[in-house]
Amino acid sequence: MAKKYTLKDLALELNISISTVSKALNNSPEISEDTQKKVLALAQLYHYRPNSTALRLRESRSNHIGVVLPDLVHHFFTTVFKGIEEYANARGFNVSVCFSDDSTQKEKDAINLLLDSGVDGIILSLAGQTQQMADWSHLQEVAAQGTHLVMFDRVTDHVPGDQVLIDDAHSAYKATQRLIDLGRTKIALLTTESYLSVNQDRQSGYIKALKESNLTYESQRVLALPKSDVDPASLKTFFTECPVDAVLCVNELIAVQAMHVVAALGKRIPEDVAFIGYNNGMLSKYSYPSLTVVDQQGYLMGEKSAEVLIDKICSKTPLDISKYVIPTTLVERNSTPNT
Amino acid sequence: MAKKYTLKDLALELNISISTVSKALNNSPEISEDTQKKVLALAQLYHYRPNSTALRLRESRSNHIGVVLPDLVHHFFTTVFKGIEEYANARGFNVSVCFSDDSTQKEKDAINLLLDSGVDGIILSLAGQTQQMADWSHLQEVAAQGTHLVMFDRVTDHVPGDQVLIDDAHSAYKATQRLIDLGRTKIALLTTESYLSVNQDRQSGYIKALKESNLTYESQRVLALPKSDVDPASLKTFFTECPVDAVLCVNELIAVQAMHVVAALGKRIPEDVAFIGYNNGMLSKYSYPSLTVVDQQGYLMGEKSAEVLIDKICSKTPLDISKYVIPTTLVERNSTPNT
DNA sequence: CACCACAACGATAACGATTTCGGTATGGTT
DNA sequence: AACCATACCGAAATCGTTATCGTTGTGGTG
């Protein structure tokens, strides 16, 4: 393992001062061509790299942002993260990631770890539990540290920070509308138990679309599933007791599992039951039948979040807090009839 | 946006010295209870946090590691990353991630970004192109910087660094053996075009199993597919021209697509054609039929990689370079007949 | 010869924290 | 009264870098 060389080491070996070495490496016109050559040669020989920590201390900027994600199993967060990472890297920023696993405690730990590591800003999507308990103390701490905050997808107005999101209510409204246009009247909604703002918004969009088309909203057509480990049996009883001709699911994981159950009950997809899910991920693309989904365009959300954050970090004057709405698209596949 | 308070600010406001403030915050016995109380109160009021960059400069350690992944679309890397992240966080380490997208240039950029950001160590899985071109210059640079390196899954002996991997040849051997035990004799191998050491090893394990059972290895039963955007047509011609009763796939993505094609050709899975894939991810679990896979236990690999790296970072004496082999397991699902 | 401009380099402060060492009261002891 | 131990606090070095400001020495000019 090689030694870490510093300006001091180079200066000592060349019998010149530290300042001269520094200036030589930074192409200062003050330094003679002769000296510069010698310095550069030795620096190259020793693979010299300036100590970034020392630079940070001077510049009081780390070129470093943190990201807190609820998880990575949902393809949506993976794509958002990809968007963040690529944009940030292109602007010379490092990205540290932590996971909250939808737990408030882990979210707090993550934020503390990031704050302690001196990030210039944080991008996060709220843990489910945090939204449920409405515990914002750790997020207020972020602002108190003078650290910029951008929230995406799962956001809150209780904390100062920019927001990047999709119009969940409207996207669900449009998706439901699409099912209605296909002639479906008994439309179910499969959502999650946990208190997530996005799912609530999607539910309201779903209800709005039904009402606008004079379809009665029946609460028994709405099934709230646990966040993980969905029991196929509960899906089976739901679909046997509650005849439907279309299903809207708040994520692709639920959709795929529901499709299996419905198919096993002898129904044809999409002829008897049409499906629309959320998250344009692997499962949607490669399921059978492939799943029509609302694409939240995670990559765009990630890019936008990183852009907003880094712009703030780099800006001399404080910028206003704002909301950015990313458009959604409906990706039609084989779980809805092609018209 | 709040101001960042320093020891100096607190000292000035309390009319005491910086050293006293520092000691008070660190519970030094030298400080009177009275003073300490005042200091703590003000520190709390101002949400004081020590500047981590300054600390790093003193300690010359950043408690920060970097990870370079080929991508996140393969579930395997997601789980490895999760393992790394959780282990590292538990030991107070931050984790920065970059993606190579299997491109050597991006891998170099990523390594440079990480080295410039002053990480204590780097965990990486080689980009496909890097393995193909055998270009190790950027990795040798890591060692030259005195930065520790751990490689997992896609590794090389041309660079000094620890290795964490599975026994690819043996796992493929065992999987193939399993298919043979099920009475299959015409076993295909679906692999990728790109030069990946792991896939070559898997192929040799596949061949070894065939030969040991006196089955002829026929090269037309091996299909090398492009890394992305597999053309269903090429799969269709393969399976029509080449009758098989079992298929081993080097990843779950290929397996799922192949299963769709085979099912569309009127064959039953697993009765007519059995499937075994790699990567125990979402696709395997929720495909129809669900896929029997070799589980590489990515989470364990991630944990082990992080453990090895952080142990090296924290160790005073230089530790030896070693290889760690993570055991694989065969997860049996419905793409193979249950015996 | 006195003066000055300029090229080339060095000393030093600064970033924010810890820590070692020194200093100054205060109290008690002989 | 002289001394010393103790309690409490402050000055300064240190980490590695850059930037500001001096400080040389050389050459040319009046």
Image: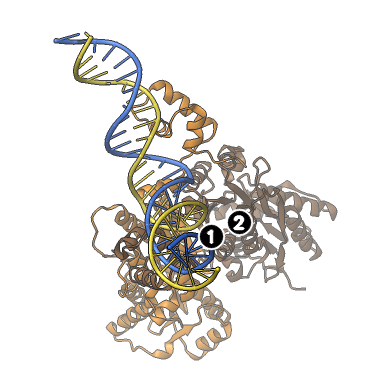
Chain colours: A orange, B brown, C yellow, D blue
Q: Quadrant of residue A117?
A: bottom left
Q: Is residue B188 left or right of residue B141?
A: right
Q: Is the same chain shared between marks 1 and 2?
A: yes
Query: In which chain is the residue bearing label 2?
Result: B
Q: Which sits in the foreground, B301 or A239?
A: B301
Cα distance between the residues tagged 1 and 2: 9 Å
Q: Is residue A172 above or below residue B232?
A: below
Q: Position of residue B83 (x, y in %)?
A: 59, 63
Residue under pointer 1: B93
Residue at horizontal 37 percent and vertical 76 percent from the top: A136
Q: SS for tag 1? A: loop
Q: Position of residue A315 (x, y in %)?
A: 27, 53
Q: Amino acid at mark 1?
A: Phe
Precedes in sequence: disc 1 or disc 2: 1
Q: Amino acid at mark 2?
A: Ile
Q: Which sits in the foreground, D2 or B67?
A: D2
Query: In which chain is the residue bearing label 1?
Result: B
Circle 1 residues within 10 Å: few <14, some 14–19, many ≥20:
many
Q: Which sits in the foreground, B52 or B304?
A: B52
Q: Is residue B277 above or below residue D25?
A: below
Q: Is residue A16 left or right of residue B254?
A: left
Residue at horizontal 32 percent and vertical 86 percent from the top: A215
Q: Answer yes or no: is residue A24 visible.
A: yes
Do residues under tags 1 and 2 come within 8 Å of each other at their CB atoms?
A: yes
Circle 2 residues within 10 Å: few <14, some 14–19, many ≥20:
many
Q: Quadrant of residue B166?
A: bottom right
Q: Position of residue A274 (x, y in %)?
A: 45, 76
Residue at horizontal 53 percent and vertical 84 percent from the top: A235
Q: Is residue B325 left or right of residue A322?
A: right
Residue B310 is marked as 2
Count of labels shown?
2
Q: Where's the C terminus of chain A, which quadrant?
A: bottom left
